[in-house]
Image (tube, rainbow, N blue to C red):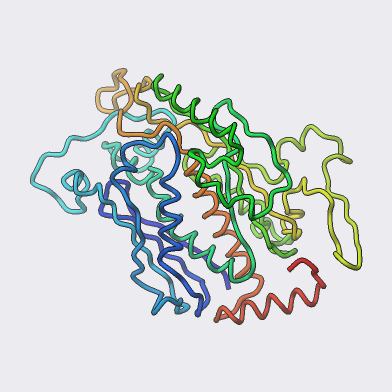
Amino acid sequence: MSLRFTTAGESHGPGLTAIVEGLPAGLELHPRDIDRDLARRQLGHGRGGRMKIEKDRAEVTAGVRHGRTLGSPVCLRVDNRDYQNWEERMNPWPVEAEVDEVHLPRPGHADLAGTMKFGHSDVRNVLERASARETAARVAAGALAKAFLRYLGVAVFSHVTRIGTVVAPQRDELEPEDFDGVDESPVRCLDAGASEAMVSEIDSARKANESLGGVFEVRAFGLLPGIGSYVSWDERLDGRLAGAIMSIQAMKGVGIGDGFDLAGRVGSQAHDEIFFSEERGFFRETNRAGGLEGGMTTGDPLVVRAAMKPLPTLTKPLRSVDLASKEPAQALRERTDSCTVPAAGVIGEAMVALVLAAGYREKFGGDHIDDARAARDAYLERIGWRRA
């Protein structure tokens, strides 16, 4: 038993669809849980005009009845309000009007490689699907995974630790309650001083017709030891998490725990020593591994960090080549954001939750949600885990 999902839809098409397969029956869902995360994805200083148009909400079209999952695939649809302004250009069917093709690929985007791969002459056939607008469907799917995980005692959060050159002070001993006000920050940063400096850096970049990237961190609390596996490469949870994070548009790096910093340390300063007491059972005093060892969770908080590049669509376009004439030209200039790192953190939450939910489904199975929890409880008793 596992959990999987897929999405469909284009940035300016009629809408986006997510299908989530593998949720057990009987899981209680609320529309506000899905719509809240969709709204959180639209937060953040540096967003562009598209966020003033879209007010994302998810419509459930299958797999849920009277607020509980049926055990069958759940289908979610998020309408694109902006489609009314793009209906001729993005209509699924032929239109009478002549629609101009786009021949100006953007450096840093999927445009050029995508047109070559699929034999398109119009870059819009690529950029519409490659757009990060697709992540609205992922966030909707992730909200279902979060609901499942919450029932089993797991909570997933995110925050921004860097935008441009501004780096927030590192906080290792975070607890779930520390994230209570994170969305009140305009950049979803837990440090007020760094948050203010990040806003100023975004404003400066916007005035200079530039975009900014940064780093966000996702943390999951309440995990049990042994989710994932060491026995096969594709079952290792760290590999699955890295793939999920790197699948988000504009991600260029991912680290688990102390990540790349571990490469510069001696072994005694890189690993988490193991202790035991009758009160706590097995425990660690550090969490440099970020809650993962040997492809499996350790029971400590999961820590995943991701590095996002600056967005490739610029208000002052970079140099490119016209696909039709092969002459030098400026890249396509289209509506864009100055910085989306705060939103990327919410997307990261969704992807981490989906991977963890799949791991829990593989470990505990169950056709009904209560079966999954009973299997979890039996496992806790067998291993004598103290921090359930």
Query: Considering depth in this image, is 142 or 163 the residue closer to the camera?
Result: 163
Can you say which quadrant of the picture contains the N terminus?
A: bottom right
Q: Position of residue 251 (x, y in %)?
A: 53, 39
Residue 125 relative to residue 97: left or right: right
Q: Is residue 270 above or below residue 322?
A: below
- Please tell me which residue is depicted at 70% across the width and 60% down the height of the picture: 232
Q: Is residue 16 left or right of residue 194?
A: left
* Residue at figure coordinates x 39%, y 79% from the top left: 66
Instruction: Find residue 372 and report its image quarter.
Output: bottom right
> For this view, does 344 lie left or right of residue 51?
right
Along the viewing direction, whichever of 151 and 262 lies nearer the viewer: 151
Q: Residue furthest left?
A: 96
Asked if 235 appears above or below 27 in the picture, the reply is above
Residue at x 31% of width, y 37% of height: 49
Relative horizontal placement of residue 347, taking residue 151 as reference (left or right): left
Q: Nearer the viewer, residue 84 or 199?
A: 199
Tell how many labels. Answer: 0
Q: Position of residue 376 (x, y in %)?
A: 68, 75
Q: Position of residue 181 (x, y in %)?
A: 55, 48
The C terminus - image quarter: bottom right
